[in-house]
């Protein structure tokens, strides 16, 4: 069966997400809850539009590459599991 591959895939994803959550807690991402509560109500019309910088484009390309690699890994695991399952 190909269940061990999917269990490994889910386990790796869970470990990575827990590591990122732990980093967010240690970095103080959730400390200012009073400010976070009112962010959807903030009016942004009086602020000038932001300019796209080179760093923003690099981040966009990096995220696209990560998403492509993740989908490729998923397709590889699925193809391997289907090909070698008998």
Image: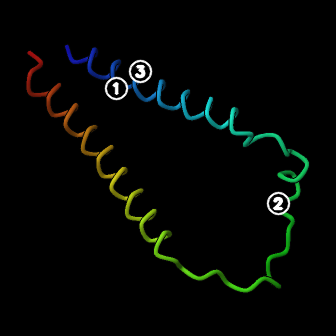
Residue at horizontal 77 percent and vertical 40 percent from the top: 30
x%, y% of residue 48? 73, 86
**Front one among 77 and 28:** 28
Mark with earlier residue (2, 1):
1
Q: Is residue 4 left or right of residue 54?
A: left
Residue annotated with mark 3: 11
x%, y% of residue 9? 34, 26
Hey, which quadrant is residue 11 in on the image?
top left
Residue annotated with mark 2: 39
Given contact means CB atoms under 8 Å apart, are the residues at marks 3 and 1 in contact? Answer: yes
Q: 10 Å neighbourhood of mark 1: few (<14), some, or many (≥20)?
A: some
x%, y% of residue 60? 44, 64
- Quadrant for the C terminus in the image: top left
Q: How many marks?
A: 3
**SS for tag 2?**
helix
**Front one among 80 and 15:** 15
Q: Is residue 84 left or right of residue 44?
A: left
Disc 2 to disc 3, C-alpha distance: 34 Å
Disc 3 to disc 1, C-alpha distance: 5 Å
Q: 10 Å neighbourhood of mark 2: few (<14), some, or many (≥20)?
A: few
Mark with earlier residue (2, 3):
3
Residue at horizontal 56 percent and vertical 27 percent from the top: 18
Residue annotated with mark 1: 9
Q: Is residue 52 left or right of residue 36?
A: left
Q: 10 Å neighbourhood of mark 3: few (<14), some, or many (≥20)?
A: few
x%, y% of residue 27? 69, 39
Q: Up-down: is 34 above or below 9?
A: below
Residue at horizontal 17 percent and vertical 25 percent from the top: 81
Given contact means CB atoms under 8 Å apart, are the residues at marks 2 and 1 in contact? Answer: no
Q: Residue furthest right?
A: 34
Given contact means CB atoms under 8 Å apart, are the residues at marks 2 and 3 in contact? Answer: no
Disc 2 to disc 1, C-alpha distance: 36 Å
């Amino acid at each position: 069966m190909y269940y061990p591959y999917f269990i490994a895939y889910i386990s790796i994803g869970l470990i990575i997400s827990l590591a990122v959550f732990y980093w967010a807690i240690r970095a103080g991402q959730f400390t200012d809850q009073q400010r976070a509560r009112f962010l959807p109500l903030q009016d942004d019309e009086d602020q000038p539009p932001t300019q796209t910088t080179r760093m923003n484009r690099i981040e966009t390309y990096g995220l696209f590459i990560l998403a492509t690699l993740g989908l490729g890994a998923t397709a590889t695991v699925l193809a391997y599991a289907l090909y070698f399952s008998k």
